Image: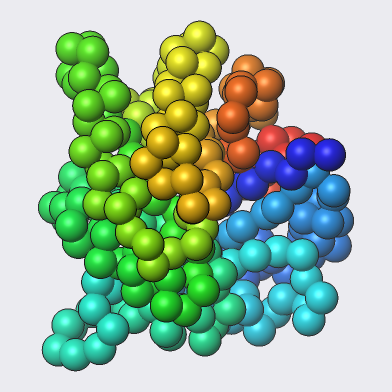
C-alpha cells in the first residue's frame, strides 16, 4: 500500500499551549491515524513547541516532528537563529525550508536555502523543500522555468540522500484556489522526470501544498507521482486534519 506523507505546517497559528493541547487532547486518535499503513504524519509546530511535543510523544509514537525553518549556519553570532543540530536534539526528523512566506517576507534566496539543506543532511533531518511560482509567473507560462531555477542548487548536491519537494504555488496558499487536476498531473509528471534526470541518486518524494482540505484532497490523491501533502490552516484543526488523512 502506498504511504502518503501528511505534513502539518502550523506556521505561527498555534501558540505553545495550543500546540501541546492539540497533541494531548487528541493523543489516542492522532496516534491511531499516524499508525495507519498508508500514512506518515509529520507535525511542524513553532520552534518553541518542538521540545515539549517531543517530550509528550510516547516512545513508540508514530508521529514525526518537523521544524518550519532552520539556520543556514551551524554556529556563531546569528541572533535569533536555530541550528540544525538543536533541531535534531529535540526529535526533528524533517524540516521545511524555502517556504514561500520565507522567500517573500524574509528574502530567502535559493543559495541560502541550499546551505540549510546541506546542514540538515549532516544531522539526518530530511529537508522539505518548498518551491512554487507566483500567479503572474503562472499566467505567463513560466512555471517550469521558475521551478527549475529553485531546484537547481539542490539537485546538484551529492551530500544528501533524501528530500521531500513540496510544490506550493504561491497563489494557492491560503486562498482556497488550487490548480486543476490536469495542470497538476502535467506538473508532477514534469517534476518526477526532472528529478530523475538531474538527481537520479537522490530519494525524492513529491508533495503538493496550497489549500489542501477534506474536499480538495479527493482530487489531489489520485495524482500521478504524488507522495503526500503539505497542509497549512486545515492542519491546525484536529477534525479537519483527521478528515484529510482518513
Ligand atoms: P494552506 O493549506 O493554508 O493553503 O497553506 C499551505 C501552506 O503554506 C503549507 O505550507
Can residue 22 be seen in the rendering of this structure? yes
- Quarter of the image that includes the N terminus: top right
How was this image coloured?
Answer: rainbow
Can residue 16 be seen in the rendering of this structure? no
- Residue at 68% of width from left, 21% of height from top? 222
Residue 94 position within the rendered picture, expressed as x and y whole percent measured from the top left: 52, 64
- Quarter of the image that includes the C terminus: top right
- Residue at 61% of width from left, 40% of height from top? 228
Residue 187 picture quarter: top left
Residue 239 position within the rendered picture, expressed as x and y whole percent measured from the top left: 72, 43
Q: Nearer the viewer, residue 181 or 193?
A: 193
- Residue at 84% of width from left, 49% of height from top? 36
Please indicate whether residue 20 sits to the left or right of residue 81 in the image.
right
Q: Is residue 76 above or below residue 177?
A: below
Please indicate whether residue 144 sits to the left or right of residue 112 in the image.
right
Residue 129 position within the rendered picture, expressed as x and y whole percent measured from the top left: 39, 50
Q: Nearer the viewer, residue 191 or 237?
A: 191
Residue 71 picture quarter: bottom left
Residue 242 picture quarter: top right
The furthest residue to the bottom: 76
Q: Is residue 136 above or below residue 204?
A: above
Count of numbered tags: 0
Residue 217 position within the rendered picture, expressed as x and y whole percent measured from the top left: 64, 26
Q: Nearer the viewer, residue 154 or 70?
A: 154
- Residue at 42% of width from left, 78% of height from top? 122
Q: Is residue 211 above or below residue 128?
A: above
Please indicate whether residue 226 sits to the left or right of residue 15 in the image.
right
Amino acid at each position: 500500500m502506498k504511504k502518503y506523507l501528511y505534513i502539518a505546517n502550523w506556521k505561527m497559528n498555534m501558540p505553545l499551549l495550543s500546540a501541546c493541547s492539540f497533541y494531548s487532547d487528541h493523543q489516542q486518535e492522532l496516534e491511531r491515524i499516524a499508525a495507519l499503513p498508508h500514512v506518515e504524519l509529520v507535525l511542524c509546530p513553532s520552534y518553541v513547541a518542538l521540545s515539549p511535543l517531543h517530550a509528550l510523544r510516547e516512545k513508540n509514537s508514530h508521529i514525526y516532528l518537523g521544524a518550519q525553518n532552520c539556520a543556514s549556519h551551524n554556529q556563531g553570532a546569528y541572533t535569533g537563529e536555530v541550528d540544525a543540530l538543536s533541531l535534531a536534539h529535540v526529535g526533528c526528523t524533517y524540516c521545511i525550508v524555502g517556504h514561500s512566506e520565507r522567500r517573500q517576507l524574509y528574502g530567502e534566496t535559493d543559495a541560502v536555502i541550499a546551505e540549510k539543506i546541506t546542514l540538515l543532511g549532516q544531522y539526518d533531518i530530511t529537508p522539505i523543500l518548498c518551491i512554487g511560482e507566483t500567479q503572474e509567473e503562472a499566467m505567463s507560462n513560466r512555471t517550469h522555468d521558475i521551478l527549475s531555477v529553485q531546484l537547481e542548487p539542490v539537485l546538484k548536491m551529492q551530500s544528501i540522500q533524501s528530500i521531500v519537494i513540496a510544490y506550493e504555488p504561491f497563489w494557492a496558499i491560503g486562498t482556497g484556489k488550487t490548480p486543476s487536476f490536469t495542470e497538476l498531473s502535467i506538473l508532477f509528471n514534469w517534476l518526477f522526470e526532472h528529478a530523475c534526470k538531474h538527481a537520479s541518486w537522490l530519494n525524492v518524494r513529491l508533495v503538493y501544498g496550497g489549500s489542501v482540505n477534506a474536499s480538495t484532497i479527493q482530487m489531489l490523491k489520485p495524482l500521478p507521482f504524488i507522495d503526500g501533502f503539505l497542509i497549512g490552516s486545515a492542519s491546525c484543526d484536529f477534525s479537519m486534519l483527521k478528515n484529510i488523512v482518513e
